[in-house]
Amino acid sequence: AALAAVRMLRPATAAPKEVRPLKAAGTGAGLGALTGLLGVGGGFLAVPALVTVLAFEMQAAVGTSLLVITTNSLASLMTRTGGAAGLDWAVVAPFASAAILGAWDGRRLAAKVSGVRLQQVFAVLLLGVAAVMLVDAVV
């Protein structure tokens, strides 16, 4: 996470690279493995992977990440709905509703920020997350 954040903070020096399906699949597989292993992934790993490995612009990376997260979430939901531990809708419904409203507001705010500035802010937040993860692992 820290390495991706540092790469995102550096200014782009070359034109965007051509995205190759095999490279995209490999990046997705790595992200999926981390998500399955550590329970993390989402935007905090998908967006940096799309920006740094696949040379997406920040806005395109955010939109693509959201689509990937939605697809993964729906697949996970399908596999878990038949399990012994049912979903606690008293928690899921308000959490999901608030998240949807927050995403709507976040989209409105993101429209007011340039892609470069949004990438820088995201990279700084990612560095913070990496620092918290490091402290949590050490302590």
Image (tube, rainbow, N blue to C red):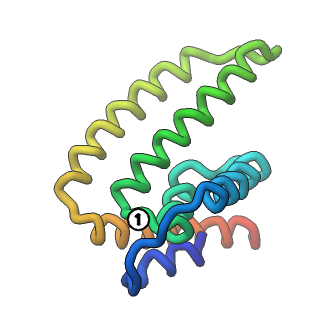
The quarter holding residue 74 reads top right
Return the x and y of residue 104 as percentages of the image width and height.
29, 36
Seen at 52% across and 34% down, the residue is 70
For the image, the number of numbered tags is 1
Nearer to me, 134 or 52? 52
Q: Which residue is farthest left?
A: 112
Residue 125 in sight here: no
Return the x and y of residue 127 as percentages of the image width and height.
51, 72
Return the x and y of residue 101 as percentages of the image width and height.
32, 32
Instruction: Tell me if residue 130 comes above or below residue 28 in the rendering.
Output: below
Circle 1 sits in a helix, a strand or a loop, which is it? helix
Return the x and y of residue 69 as percentages of the image width and height.
55, 40
The quarter holding residue 100 reads top left
Q: Residues within 10 Å of mark 1 (few under 14, many from 20)?
A: many
Q: Quadrant of the N terminus?
A: bottom right
Seen at 56% across and 69% down, the residue is 53
Instruction: Tell me if residue 132 comes above or below residue 47 in the rendering.
Output: below
Nearer to me, 49 or 9? 49
Instruction: Tell me if residue 117 comes above or below residue 13 in the rendering.
Output: above
Query: Is residue 112 found left or right of 77 in the rendered image?
Result: left
Seen at 37% across and 68% down, the residue is 119
Q: Amino acid at mark 1?
A: Phe
Query: Is residue 103 found left or right of 73 in the rendered image?
Result: left
> Which residue is labeled 1 in the image?
122
Q: Quadrant of the C terminus?
A: bottom right
Residue 5 in sight here: yes
